[in-house]
Amino acid sequence: MTHEGIGVLDGPLAKAIFDSFPSGIVVQGMEGKIVAANPAAEKILGLALAQMLGVTSIDPGWRALHADGRAFPGEGHPAMVALRGGQAVRDVVMGVFNPTTSAYTWINVNAIPIRDTATGSVQGVYSTFQDITRQELAERALRDKDAEFRMAVQTSSDGFWIADATGKILEVNEAYCKQSGYSRDELLTLSIPDLDYLEKSEEVASRMQRIVQNGAERFVSVHRAKDQRRWPVEVVASYSPTGGGRFYCFIKDQTEQQNSAELIWHQANFDRLTDLPGRALFFDRLSQECSAARRNGKQVALLFADLDVFKPVNDLYGHDAGDVVLQTVASRWLSCVRGKDTVARLGGDEFAIIVGNLDGPNEATAIAAKVIESLQADIALPHNLACSVGVSLGIAMYPANAVEMDSLLSAADKAMYVCKARGKNSFFLSDAVAGHLSNSADWMAFNDSHLVGVAEIDAQHRQLVRLVNDLNRDISANAEQPHIDRLFDGLMNFTIHHFQTEHRFMLEHHYPDTSAHDLEHGKLTAELRQIIQNLGIEGDLLVLQKIKDWLIAHIRNSDKALGQFLNEQGVH
């Protein structure tokens, strides 16, 4: 995007950086008129981009103050000074009235001229700024002995520190005394490393240096109380060079939030009735086990389990009795496996068991026999009733039966239905052969159902599928990590190229949903980048499965409509 000859936003990467930059950025042309502002600037200033475009720094609508409370004239704005003098203006503190909050937001502004690369002439100016309102208020409390602010800090439910450049505590509020168990006098003898619990003390010094360099930072940490209790905190820290250097830290106790987050995570990943891992956590653990097995030359057994004659229990005794059966089954099966193995409930009366680090299928069939044996005894129900159920087990082995997650799941599922057909209450070991049911070279198939009818787009979709299949093949072959990383980089780069191609088609043929489609591309690019970043966290098989699902959904949900429109315009 180019404005008045200013090309600072040209190209999708520059635009993405501009839009995601955490500091506010405002770009002004030679006449001082604003031609661009990023989302951070809109948030800090409390103004939408449309309200700023075309406005200059000397517009009477601005209400700005110096740090000492004097009015800040528009002619003295750093951007106007930089435009007139052709030199950068740095570290100017000013308060700008924010119409959203009806209060002044304090910012630290740097204004840098934009020069023509050929002639060196000034073409405009861009200003970057950060919200330093907390810092400014804290400094004013010290400088002016502002009793009202001191009272607000002292009565705040959040902790508050002031520390010098070495990290020595200079001032604290009552809230932090209560949080830490120390008295104020005791805290004033301590330093940040005494309270901020990290694995290595040098991490504290490194973080302090970052805050000095950046001016402010928000982070989570763990603090250590007087009784050595540790508790999670969120810290908003800012730095001022005044008085030889001061750190101002607002500290929020995150214990309740952490407990809530852990509860939410548990509820999202574990079955409410049996407290077994649910479907999402099951896939994550299966991916991790298969990745570990490939690295160590071991095998993984996936057992799909479906209860026999469970429906009659529900029909005869009611759903409460059915819940008791499911809970009892879960408890008995947990006793059949090792602590590191996974018993998961996938839904209804369907379960799955993951057993890793195996040398062969005999270990898996032995566990299957124990699982079946565990259900031989009757299950006690409410009101002195009892019932019995059986189980049909399908077993698939990684990598013998399949080398991809969806193929492994399919093999185990088919093996389980063989048991159902043979009379139930038994197990069957899959006879699938990896590479026969699902050839790793074309694990992700591109067929006629994926065609959108535009040759260039279809060709690029085929190439994306080839890139995913290349990744699957080389990951399955245990290729070196640098090679795998290069393949992921290639997939990312080609995806961006593909989206640029679709954007070109949309502009050339005036596609009515261009904005929505571009927004979808932005979301998909971010999702793909996040999926790739999770490679070392989630396991490569789960990452591959997510990429496969992501790409197929992109073609079906986004590109089919675009292809139909282009076909109607005569593009094929």
Image: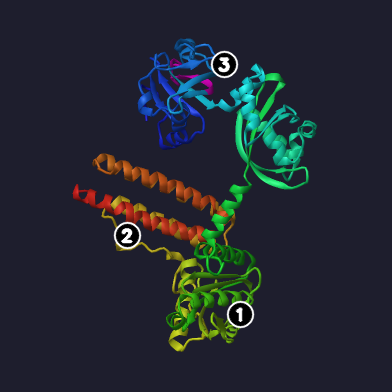
Depth check, front residue: 427 or 197: 197
Q: Residue furthest bottom?
A: 423
Q: Is residue 213 above or below residue 278?
A: above
**Which residue position holds label 3?**
67
Quadrant position of residue 243? top right
- Report if residue 183 lies within the magenta region: no
Mark 2 residue crowding within 10 angstroms, few (<14) / some (14–19) / many (20+):
some
**Which residue position holds label 1?**
367
At mark 1, the secondary structure is helix
Give the alpha-carbon distance from disc 1 to disc 3, as whole Å: 73 Å
Left or right of residue 75, residue 499 in this image = left
Q: Is residue 145 above or below residue 457?
A: above
First in sequence: mark 1 vs mark 3: 3
Depth check, front residue: 280 or 143: 143
Left or right of residue 35, residue 386 in this image = right
Look at the magenta stretch and give its main secondary structure: strand
**Which residue position holds label 2?**
450
The residue stretch that appears in magenta: 106-122
Depth check, front residue: 311 or 197: 311
